Image (cartoon, grey):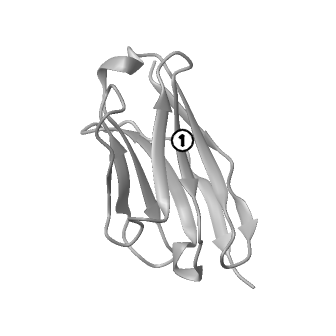
């Protein structure tokens, strides 16, 4: 069965960096675009970034463009989210999702606070 497992979340001060990872299994990973989403407390889940199946076409929400970078390693069935210049409004649970599907990971908490 499809499994997506996120890791790498934590607490960081404003301006800091974190790298999230998502390990995928149960499907042909290199065929599917992958996405990252997040959900802040009391808010709806929102799109953060996506990447094409071959990694050539990343895309980002305006709120993270220039600070976050999505990448993937098809040999390892992994997708990553490098987050730099973190701000308090980046706080939330970050989810990995297979694009255009109902397959989500369990989420990893990111807290940005001084």
Residue drawn at x 59%, y 64% as measured from the top left: 84
Expressed as whole percent of the image width and height from the top left, the position of residue 83 reads 57, 59
Mark 1, residue position = 80
As drawn, is 55 to the left or to the right of 40? left
The image quarter containing residue 87 is: bottom right
In this rendering, the count of numbered labels is: 1
Q: Image point 53% across, 72% down: which residue? A: 90
Residue 66 horizontal side relative to residue 31, left or right: right
Can you name the residue that lies furthest to the left here?
100
Determine whether 80 is above or below 2 in the image: below
**Helix, strand, or loop for circle 1?**
strand
Q: Position of residue 111 (x, y in %)?
A: 66, 71
Location of the C terminus by quadrant is bottom right
Residue occupying the point 47% across, 39% down: 71
- Residue 89 place in picture, x, y as percent: 52, 80
Residue 2 is situated, as x and y percent measured from the top left of the image, at 44, 23
Q: Residues within 10 Å of mark 1 (few under 14, many from 20)?
A: many
In the rendered image, the vertical position of residue 33 relative to residue 112, given as above or below: above
Side of 29 where 18 appears, left or right: right
Where, by quadrant of the figure, is residue 110 drawn? bottom right
| Residue shown at the point (40%, 16%) measured from the top left | 27
């Amino acid at each position: 069965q499809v499994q997506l497992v996120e890791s790498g979340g934590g607490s960081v001060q404003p301006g800091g960096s974190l790298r999230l990872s998502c390990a995928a299994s149960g499907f042909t990973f290199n065929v599917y675009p992958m996405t990252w989403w997040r959900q802040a407390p009391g808010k709806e889940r929102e799109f953060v970034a996506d990447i094409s199946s071959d990694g050539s076409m990343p895309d980002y929400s305006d709120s993270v463009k220039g600070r976050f970078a999505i990448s993937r390693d098809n040999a390892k069935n992994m997708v990553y989210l490098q987050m730099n210049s973190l701000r308090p409004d980046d706080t939330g649970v970050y989810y990995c999702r297979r694009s255009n599907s109902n397959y989500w990971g369990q989420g990893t908490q990111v807290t940005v606070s001084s």
